[in-house]
Amino acid sequence: MKTIALLCVCLLVLLSAGCGGQTDPAPVIPTPDASSPSGGTTVPTEPSSTVKTDNTTTPTEPSAPSEPSSPTTAAEPPAPSDGYAIADRAVSLIGTSFRMGGIGPTEFDNPGFVYYCYKEQGIKIPRRAPQMAETGTEIPKDQLQPGDVVIFCNDIGGEPAFVGIYIADGEFVSCDNPDTPTKTHNFNAKYFTQRFITARRYY
């Protein structure tokens, strides 16, 4: 009796399985990838956006040129009546003749030449060498500038008697005597260094 009941139960189970239809198979779980560092399934990721770095240096606008620095203060351009103009006038008269008592414009005695060059620039100075040696501003001989009056004696230790106009680079111009018309001289020559008395500036 028990055997018949057991067979009936088995038959019902088989019939139930045949009539219930196919069921969805259970999902297959992938086995871990042994090559994956984490031991799990490797999940692909979206590729990151590659940012291309441009190593080219971006040109910059050229900077505006800087203003030039103020130059060291220089002497003002020579005015018509300053020492440079006097020296230029003296040079322009090189070669003119000597005449005792002459004060220009083509013949001069020695102090008359200096007197004339200054007068042409509107500057009044004494007519004779002794008075020139006592007026104006005394200038050391190592500070001579164009246009200064240089004064000498004829005999060493004597009185002021011979004058000229310093022009530059150790030279001065004078009108000496009938045999030596207006010309340049070397201020540093022994003859003149031994007879130098003073230098005067009137401008």
Image (cartoon, rainbow, N blue to C red):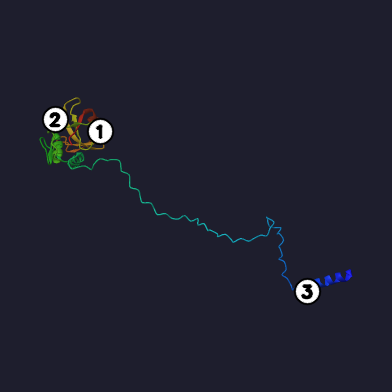
Of the pair 125 and 100, the residue shown nearer to us: 125
Given residues 90 and 60, the one toward you in this image is: 60
**What residue type is disc 3 on?**
Gly
Q: Quadrant of residue 124?
A: top left
Q: Amino acid type of disc 2?
A: Gln
**SS assignment at label 3:** helix
User: Rounded to the nearest whole Å, what is the CA distance between mark 1 and mark 2?
Assistant: 22 Å
**Does the residue at mark 1 contact the one at mark 3 (Cβ under 8 Å)?**
no
The disc labelled 1 sits on which kind of residue? Gln
The Cα atoms of the two marked residues, 2 and 3, are separated by: 155 Å
| Residue 48 horizontal/vertical position (percent) | 57, 59
Badge 1 element: helix
Tell me the tag on residue 131. 2
- Outermost residue, left direction? 101
Q: Secondary structure at mark 2?
A: helix
Q: Which residue is mark 1?
A: 143
Tag 1–tag 2 contact (CB < 8 Å): no
Which of the two labelled residues, at mark 2 and mark 3, occupies the earlier sequence position?
A: 3
The N terminus lies in quadrant: bottom right
Which residue is nearer to you in this view: 176 or 42?
42
Which label sits in the foreground, 2 or 3? Answer: 3
